[in-house]
Amino acid sequence: SLALPLQLETRTGANVRSGPGTGFGVIYTLPARSRIVAYSSAEQWLRVVDDSGRRGWISQSLIRARP
C-alpha cells in the first residue's frame, strides 16, 4: 500500500504508457532522473504526471524516491 501522492524520479530512461501494463502503447519516454508525481497505483504500475503536466502509467521498477 502506498501513501499517495509520491514525489519520485526515474531510475533510467522510462516509457510512460497509456494504461497499467506493457500491452498499452507508449505515449512518451522520460530520461533518467526525470521528476514525476504518482497519484494512484494498479498492481506494479503507477499513474503519474511529469513536470510538464503529461500523464500516463509507469512501472514501479523504473522509479525511485527523490533524493
Image (spheres, rainbow, N blue to C red):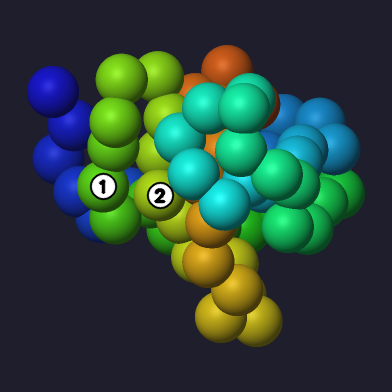
Q: Nearer the viewer, residue 8 or 16?
A: 16
| Quarter that holds the N terminus | top left
Q: Nearer the viewer, residue 62 or 42?
A: 42
- Residue 48 visible somewhere in the drawing: yes
Which of the 4 image quadrants contains residue 52?
bottom right
Q: Is residue 11 above or below residue 53?
A: above
Q: Are marks 1 and 2 in contact (CB under 8 Å)?
A: yes
- Residue 8 visible somewhere in the drawing: no
Look at label 1 and name its amino acid. Answer: Ser
**Residue wearing tag 2:** 47
Residue ID at (29%, 31%) = 42
Residue 13 appears at what percent x and percent y? Answer: 85, 38
Residue 11 appears at what percent x and percent y? Answer: 72, 30
In the image, which disc is placed on residue 59? Answer: none
Q: Residue furthest bottom?
A: 52
**Residue wearing tag 1:** 40
Using the numbered discs, state the Cα–Cα distance from disc 1 to disc 2 in whole angstroms.
5 Å
Residue 26 appears at what percent x and percent y? Answer: 75, 47
For residue 15, side relative to residue 35 (left or right):
right
For residue 29, side relative to residue 22 (left or right):
right
